[in-house]
Amino acid sequence: MNIESIRQPFIKNFSGDFSGNPMQRATLKVLFSTINPAGFDHPKLIAFNEKLSEEIGLGKFNEQDLDFLVGNNLPENVQPYATAYAGHQFGNWAGQLGDGRAILAGEIMNNAGEKTEIQWKGAGATPYSRHADGRAVLRSSVREYLMSEAMFHLKVPTTRALSLCFTGEDIIRDMMYDGNPGYEQGAVIIRTAESFLRFGHFELISAQREYKMLQDLVDFTIQNYFPEITSSGTDRYKDFFKNVCTRTADLMTEWFRVGFVHGVMNTDNMSVLGLTIDYGPYSMMDEYDLNFTPNTTDLPGRRYAFGKQGQISQWNLWQLANALHPLIKDEKFLEDTLNSFGNYFWENHDKMLCRKFGFDQLQETDEEFFSNWQALMQELQLDHTLFFHQLEKLQDSTNLSSLFENVSYSILTSDAIVKLENFIKKYRERLSANQISQEDALELMKKNNPKFILRNYLLFECIEEIKEGKTKMLDKLTHALENPYEELYPEFSKRRPSGYDDISGCSMLSCSS
């Protein structure tokens, strides 16, 4: 691997704490602290993403590179660091936070001039670990490694995963926060992104009234990650905020398209680049439910439920607007931009649903059609992904009972079949209003409706196998997630088996997941 090419522009551009002290503490008026990974004596490689390594300019993996993948024996050009940020967690201001389980190696540039940040997760404590050990367990590491790659291949903006390794040590965790801790195998992943900058980075500096540093951070972000912004002065910062709003709305639309529920949409878990970041208690939708949250910590309020993700992203953008106000100083602009967010998001959302249903363009009556569809999905407990899979197979003579009986998580009664028939009748009427052929409509559906999603129960099975030293399920899931719009493994295209309904990690998880 081409580790010698890793650069560190962030720590060269901003004030930091260079003490290397991992003690948890406030680090005022700095954006990062240098810190060395803990080091592990007996690491073992589980998975390596060679395609990604080649893409970003790191090249092929050699046995001697294992040390780098867990943060051991680093070369002189790599000065690891953790960044400081703040955030609103479950709607409340949490003050200083930061990279508690993440340590950055720096940035690499490929031959095309594309920049990628490289970050260990689970490699040891930092000043921002909040009395924790900075380690990660195998369970959460496998989930992030596989899901971030699944989202990439679903064409959803996301961080990505480069490697997954055992650390060779066991660490203690209380998985469900219920007073029953236990030992679990430790692991480290390397994840990558164009940038890991979050809303919370800007919130922290603004809250500390470090306005010159805030301006420098926004300028750095625009220069490196928003080449489309060419304006100057205050307009430059206005364009930045508008761009972040648009990217965030586009990301939320993609989450709704594939049925992804993040589970913990705190402002410190929101990327200014519009990436899906921090895979904790997430879930792909099984049965369609706007009120579903995969996060036990989010109960009973369900602040981060599936159907609220657009609303919450807007709320988070309000907090970013407050942080950027010292640079923009135009309340009306900020209010107008935020108020228009909803219109943009819902129009974008409905256009996305049109593509999923095979409609060539949005019509005035579609809002009612989509509302009726949502009500039907929830009432009949239909599987979000499998419903569209079956809809693509719809023929004039289709027996709806046989087509949809294995898509529902409840028994389809005769009344339920009648409701399905009425909906399908309206759906066919709406299809007839298309200006494109039936073949083109079907192709539109196939491009927007995945055949494979990485369900929690599949992840659970994979994690259990890896614990036993097996990787057959890991390899199979990796192949499937790299081709999500093809049905390579029919056994994965089925609803969650009922035997997994009450198993921890198969439906709901805690924030520590």
Image (cartoon, helix red, strand yellow):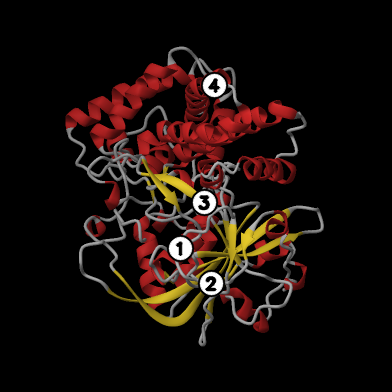
**Label 3: which residue?**
85
Q: How far apart are marks 4 and 1 (CA)?
A: 34 Å
Q: In this view, does 447 lie to the left or right of 284?
A: right
Q: How far apart are marks 3 and 2 (CA)?
A: 18 Å
Q: How far apart are marks 2 and 4 (CA)?
A: 41 Å
In percent of width and height, residue 424 lies at 36, 25
Would you call the spot at circle 3 few (<14 residues within 10 Å), some (14-19), or many (20 or more)? many
Q: Which of marks 4 and 1 is in front?
A: 1
Residue found at x 57% / y 51%: 152
Q: Is mark 4 on a helix, strand or loop?
A: helix
Q: Distance between the residues labelled 1 and 2?
A: 10 Å
Give the mark, 4 or 1, whose residue is nearer the N terminus: 1
**Label 1: which residue?**
25
Q: Distance between the residues labelled 4 and 3?
A: 24 Å
- Residue 331 disc label: 4
Q: Can residue 471 be seen in this view?
A: yes
Confirm or deny contact between disc 1 and disc 2 (CB under 8 A): yes
Which residue type does callout 1 highlight?
Answer: Arg
Would you call the spot at circle 4 few (<14 residues within 10 Å), some (14-19), or many (20 or more)? few
Give the mark, 3 or 2, whose residue is nearer the N terminus: 2
